[in-house]
Amino acid sequence: MPAPHASLILDCVCLIYFDTFHGVKVHTNDFCGHPPWMENSISYINPVGNFTKSDSNNSVLISLFNQHRQFYQSYQPVFTDGSKSLNHVGCAFLTNGHIIGYKLHSFTSVFFSEITAVYFAFKYIDEYAIRKSILYTDSMSLLESLRSSSTRNPLIKEVKNFYRHLLSKGARILFSWVPSHVGITGNELADKSAKSATEFLTRPIVYADVRSAVNQWCHCQWPKKWNMETNNKLHVIKPVLSHWVRKLNRRCDVVLTRLRIGHTRLTHKYLLFAESSPTCSHCGDILTVKHILTDCVAVNRRRLRSTVQQWTGEITKLTAIHSFNWLKNQRRGFETVHGLLKPGGEAAFFFALDSPYYDGMIVTGSNPKFLPYFEVGWKLLINVFVDWIN
Ligand SMILES: [Zn+2]
């Protein structure tokens, strides 16, 4: 059964229908526009300094913002925001009592909705010839992109060009970050307006957003088609599409892949040597990987040697050192150990009930960067255990 968040993602993705792609216009990138050595680096203000949302009371953040506004009271505040939910993408800006919001194409990412809000705020500043203004946004990634001088994002370039144009006309424009959802009125109103905007804006969509939508659509179609391939011999091996867990080395992966697809030298060399297909020396059936691993009754006993059931009720003394800290289902682990013991058998467990060391190890071990090293450790542990048990 897929994890709840996986099914939610699938539901979101499946909202993209093939028809949605008709008429989509992609935003062109002007490679020969403004040369990089003439790029402006746009800095921004952070009115709350080192105070964070998680560590500070909302009233403190609002107070800091109000002090900032006192200081910059000669600058007209312009609040911008973008939002994306399951069924709606929108952007909005608020200034001088005007709230203007637009609904955007469903492919648009939240990042581009934020930029679009800034773009239309600039248009407003231009149209009404506002001399001094501060743009407030809660998108730190947008501000960082504006600050970067090496962006290839066409909408960021467009906004920067517009910014230069406004500066050349004598406008003074500052940028400021504001914390979202702490009760700063302008930010709250812009957010609400972005979420409820109904006027649809027909603007080209940036290539990155279209590519993301196409990827999502393909990933939605793929499992649907694969679920119908029930006669495909590989469907039994991999009924649910996901990445295989990679092993320690390529040799290991090669062997496992050959076993999964059922193509091995033992079972398929007859094709190279123009021989007849091999049969099982035990039972005479056609020799396949599946036959050896799961079907052949003659090797049943050998196959069962590697299972826990083989040792049920066979062990007199069992020691587990630190093993139980790693089990997801510890109750089941204890029950399995109990089942392995002979009547009167003994088991000793050594483990820490609560340890920051293990918490740290779990966090580090789940990091893809360190996972291979942990896998090496596990393999060594398993080998030691197998040696001991034999
Ligand atoms: Zn057989």
Image (cartoon, rainbow, N blue to C red):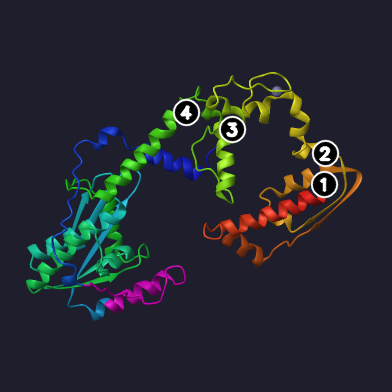
Mark 1 and mark 2: Cα distance apart in space: 15 Å
Crowding near the residue tagged with mark 4, few <14, some 14–19, many ≥20 C-alpha atoms within 10 Å: few
- From which residue to which does the magenta span run? 41-68
Q: Earlier in the sequence, mark 2 or mark 3?
A: 3
Front residue of 279/101: it is: 279
Mark 2 and mark 4: Cα distance apart in space: 37 Å
- Proximity of marks 1 and 4: CB atoms separated by less than 8 Å: no
Q: Which mark is residue 227?
A: 4
Q: Main secondary structure of the magenta part?
A: loop
Q: Which residue is mark 2?
A: 312
> x, y (%) of residue 317?
88, 50
Where, by quadrant of the figure, is residue 124 drawn?
bottom left
Front residue of 238/182: it is: 238
Label 1: element kind: loop
Mark 2 and mark 3: Cα distance apart in space: 36 Å
Is the shortest distance between ligand 1 and the CB of mark 1 under 8 Å? no
Q: Earlier in the sequence, mark 1 or mark 3?
A: 3
Q: Which mark is residue 63?
A: none
Label 4: element kind: helix
Q: Which residue is mark 3?
A: 265
